[in-house]
Image (cartoon, rainbow, N blue to C red):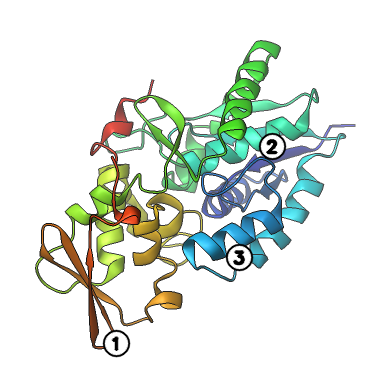
Amino acid sequence: MTTPILHIVFSPSAAGCLRQALRDAGREDHVTCHFDNLALGPINPPDPQTRLHWMEEELHYTGWEWVFAEEEAFWKAALVEDVRRVAWISRRSATEYCGFLEWLWRLGDLPCEVIDFTDMPVAGTRNRAFSLFLLYPEEIVDNGVWDRAQPLGAAARERYHGYWRQLRAENAPLRVVDAEGLRSAPITFFDQELLSFAKAWWQKPARIIGETMGEWLGTQWSSRTFRLGRGSWPPASLPSSRVACSKGAAICGTSSKARFGSSTLIKARRPDRVTFGCNGAPTTCPTTRPHLRGAGPTRGSHRGLP
């Protein structure tokens, strides 16, 4: 009897893309998806209630409970013993990389295979795959990407465990990928880049978040995401609070409705001040206050990932 194949992915958009590719290829493999974003918030341990409290206190964001409900189903499926486990990862995505490391941490010594498409080119561009969802289903099928699965050896497993052990011990607000690889970062990491896109005229927060994401992730984000035509914008795997998720980004992004209302607008009045217009009531905030301070990323620095 053939052992059933379980594909394990770490982004809902990636899961949808892979399921479509499997259907197109006439394969009956199963796919399970990790929903939580472990690049954000406490991870030692990644207790749902602790993380939920952190989201509410730090980001003023509510409504994350559905993620933890999905997580329960994921862990039940992803740790079963009588399947051939194939994990899909890109070390360019902090969200997916962290999800993979936590899964591998819980997997223990059970065997698994890995498809690492970190350096896989995106068709028609010079870019590398930031996430599986940037590949069209037909590209996955035509290139037989699932045939790239390799058994994870003991040395590689221990190396990954070492990375996650350190990140868990640091338990920082953020995990980011840059030229140094995956590392811990302060809550202010994206602030300066976010502020660099604030203009002297009113803009919607989503515009600033989107431009920051486009710069951080590279041209593949803007050129491919809108062409996928599946799901809502932003993709479920990368809402604004997951990629540009410093507190500055959180204020402008996911938590903006909770804190400012859906009609919030932003503009930069002076280099040191940003104004938030909330339902017609502007509020000017000095950018020198703690949650809008700190060394942020160098634009495009993640592109040199080893």
Mark nearer the viewer, 2 or 1: 1
Q: What's the residue at 28%, 40% (across, down)?
A: 295
Q: Mark 2 points at which residue?
A: 103
**15 or 244, nearer to the observer:** 244
Between the C-alphas of marks 1 and 3, the distance is: 25 Å
Residue 279 - label: 1
Residue projecting furthest to the bottom:
280
Quarter holding the N terminus is: top right
Q: Mark 3 points at which residue?
A: 64
- Residue 162 position, x and y percent, is 62, 21
Question: Which is more N-terminal, label 3 or label 1?
Answer: 3
Query: Is mark 3 in CB contact (under 8 Å) with mark 2?
Result: no
Between the C-alphas of marks 3 and 2, the distance is: 20 Å
Q: What's the residue at 23%, 39% (across, down)?
A: 299
Q: What residue type is labelled 3?
A: Trp
Dot 2 lies on which element? Answer: helix
